[in-house]
Amino acid sequence: MSFSESKGQTKILLESGTNELELMEFVIAGEVFGINVAKVREIMIAQEVKKMPNSHEMVEGIFKPRDEIITVIDLAKYLGLKREDDKRAVFIATHFNKLNFAFRVDKVIGIARVSWEEIKKPNRVIYGGNEGAATGIAEFSDRLITILDFEKIVAEVSPESSIQIEEIEKLGERKDTDIPILVAEDSMLLAKLIIDCLHGAGYKNIIKADNGQEAWSYLQEIKKHNEPIRKHVACIVSDIEMPLMDGHRLTKLVKEDPILSPTPLILFSSLISDEMRQKGIELGADAQITKPEIAELVRLIDELTNR
């Protein structure tokens, strides 16, 4: 299967809300890792890079494949692994959060189609201490694939490109509110940043879910109270990429439920593109916004909750 063919199949899967994704498998130091195909622009043979003074220690340098300059991150060094023969190394060129980066890996294996239900949350100490650099472990065929938190990696290498609390401070003085907001986000780093920013914007009543399944289970529980849903959840903010249940599947379930469907749901993801936006519209999302635009997220929550 070619890379372009796989991207086309990914589009069909996500449009249908079947809770599946396609992972591009790659190897570093003999270990198998994965990245969502939706984040990948292209695969290319590793090229010579120009080192940049005073750059982050994980940044190899930059290169210019065509008409743009791309920063290369040494993924093996970030993970504390030893690279294999560099003569066979490849770059995985990515695009998410409106940014372009390339990651050096030993080799690319291929593409595996898996269900989010089969992806488990990893132990927090895997690759990087308490917060970790892995968002999930997928079992495929006879091997385990570690799905890396590329948003966290980029946020550490380039903090200015991630969510900034300073953007909330620019909103000026705001009153506190106990309007309940449900946030579904699997990345520990990004979840903390989002919640800190929402607290800074006056939203003090935040319910945190690690994935779409946790969010859906919480919503099912509050339905049992026979009280207005808004009393428990006035707005849902969800990532798209999450183990067990992704944000598209969560959106589909919420908007097909006659009791929950009036609840505003915002998709806040690094994957929002024209194609993804259309999928979100078809599934019923009330708004969609690209990370790291946190001030715009607050504005949308204000609007959708009639604050």
Image: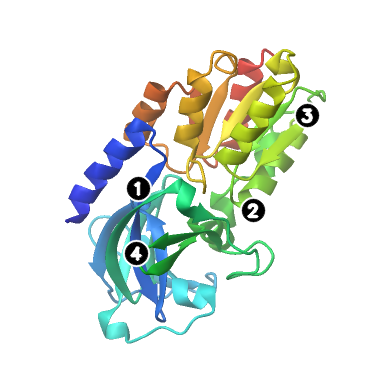
Amino acid type indicated by mark 1: Ala
Lower position in the chain sequence, tag 3 or tag 2: 2
Residue 274 horizontal side relative to residue 180, left or right: left
Q: CA distance from mark 3 to mark 4?
A: 47 Å
Q: Residue 38: give its label.
A: 1
Say which residue label 4 marks. 141
Instruction: List x then y, in percent, for residue 65.
Output: 25, 63
Q: Residue at x 66, y 69 (%)?
A: 129
Lower position in the chain sequence, tag 2 or tag 4: 4
Amino acid type indicated by mark 2: Leu
CA neighbours of label 4 inside 10 A, class few (<14), some (14 to 19), many (20+): few
Q: CA distance from mark 1 to mark 3?
A: 34 Å
Element assignment for label 2: helix
Q: Kindly report which numbered mark, 3 or 4, lies closer to the viewer in this rendering.
A: 4
Say which residue label 2 marks. 189
The quadrant the C terminus occupies is top right
Query: Looking at the picture, does residue 206 appear above or below residue 227?
Result: below
Residue 68 horizontal side relative to residue 245, left or right: left
Query: Looking at the picture, does residue 266 appear above or below residue 95?
Result: above
Instruction: List x then y, in percent, for residue 97.
Output: 46, 45
